[in-house]
Image (cartoon, grey):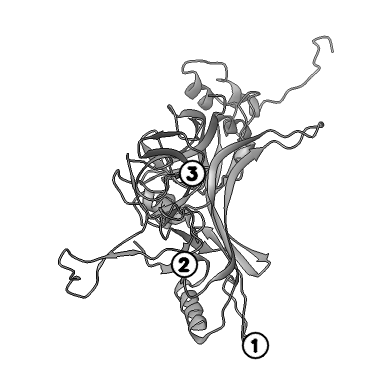
Amino acid sequence: MVALVHWDRCGLIPATVSFNQRPFSRGGGRTLSGIERTTLTDLGYWEASLESIVVRTTDQRRTWNAIRTALRGRSGLVAVPAYEHVTAPYALTGGAHLTLPLVETLHSDDTPFSDETPYVQGAIAVTLAANVGIAETIVTLRLLEGEANLVGVRFSYQHALYETGPLIEVDGSDWTVPVFPAIRAPIPAGATLNFDRPTCLMHLADDAGMDIGLPMIDRVSRPTVEFVEAVDYFNDLAVGLA
Amino acid sequence: MADRTLAIAVEIPFPSRTIRLWDGAGSMLAGGFVWRGGGLFTGLDEIEMAMNGESAGFSVSLSNVSSDAARAAYQDYLADKLIGTPFIVHIQPRDQYHQPLGDMRVEFTGTIADFSVTERVDRGERGDVVTATISIEVINRMEFRNLPSGSVLSNADQQLEHPGDLGFERVPGLINKSISWPNYPNN
């Protein structure tokens, strides 16, 4: 894995988050009757924008500076949180309005590990029922813990973000759903998918993407950052270069 | 399977490394190989059949070629092995969920005639945007119709083409022959 930065999901909170699909449609132009036939050549890629991020405190400004120094412009890789808490299949709430904390567990005799840390796992436990390979678009998810509805939810695996579509089949706890985008990197059967805090590996949309000013009166900046999915990284990974 | 879609993929078997690209975002696993996405093939729109015997060459720019592959291609170029490399366009049918289905079909095969690395600066909204691409000039065999053949009406060329034929045997002699015409006997 190459060096990447994680966006500070708690420190730098945007007012509006949008993760949008950008499909590859090809058309031949409109006919005289105004009709156009289009063909999908690929499911596409993610584009995200974090709008009006409140940057006010010293900590927030330092975090901002640190992230952009690490990114060094458009070529840098950043794992952007998908801010999925409204759609996440939490067992109790079925779409909480807050991100539920991770579950921390101690050993059976109530002791943590030797460095004082407990076991940590997500509040949602979903694994993959069958292997999926590159460019496949259907996955079978095995729901172990969480709300029994895996339609229209987001998850990530190794920073590749996926969004599920309408249901194809349910067999017990196995949910077969289409995903957007096409699988970027192979996921083995039994792999635990990140439903609690999914992330998407992205690039800044342009080099000046993290420009920020300092208002001298109230010192609150509200910059907007645009990202595009780092498909080049996944392509390198697929041919074994990354 | 009414909703079938197609994927366009390009294969360039450079001597030291085969580059495989397709017109999508992520990678595609098809025909037993991984095809890199993100390479937008501007220029592929000009593909035409060699129907009228015309030379149907075109220029393709490849983007999202990894630096490794670009370096390999450049090494081949320096070693004079790149010109003449085939350029193969495949079509991959896909199922209703846009997953590769069935075998790839070869739609077009050309030959690489030229290769150039271009770097261009455009004025963007927020600063200059530098684009680096590899451009490849692809031709088909009809291109030879555009080239002067270099042969002349001489006995040497005729012997190469048709050994033993004497049709051009006296051509060298004709160069210095003075022709007086008309030359009627009664004059």
Number of marks in picture: 3
Task: Name which of mark 1 and mark 3 comes first in the sequence.
Answer: 3
Q: Amino acid at mark 2?
A: Gly
Please name whichever residue, B41 or A213, is drawn nearer the observer in this view of the structure: A213
Residue B94 lies, in percent from the top left, at 49, 31
What residue occupies the far top of the structure in this picture?
B186
- Crowding around mark 1 (Cα neighbors within 10 Å: few <14, some 14 to 19, many 20+) is few
Determine the image quadrant of residue A216.
Answer: bottom right
* Residue position for label 3: A151
Chain bearing mark 1: A
* Residue position for label 2: A76
What residue occupies the far left of the structure in this picture?
A109
| In the rendered image, the vertical position of residue A148 relative to residue A12, given as above or below | above
Secondary element type, mark 1: loop
Q: Are marks 1 and 2 in contact (CB under 8 Å)?
A: no
Q: Say whether mark 2 and mark 1 are on the same chain.
A: yes
Q: Is residue A7 left or right of residue A127?
A: right
Q: Is residue B103 left or right of residue B175?
A: left
Determine the image quadrant of residue A31.
Answer: top right
C-alpha separation, residue under disc 1 versus residue under disc 3: 43 Å
C-alpha separation, residue under disc 1 versus residue under disc 2: 31 Å
C-alpha separation, residue under disc 3 versus residue under disc 2: 32 Å
| In the rendered image, the vertical position of residue A115 relative to residue B12, given as above or below | below
The residue located at (43%, 27%) in the rendering is B103
The disc placed on residue A218 is 1
Residue B179 lies, in percent from the top left, at 73, 23
Task: Name which of mark 1 and mark 2 comes first in the sequence.
Answer: 2
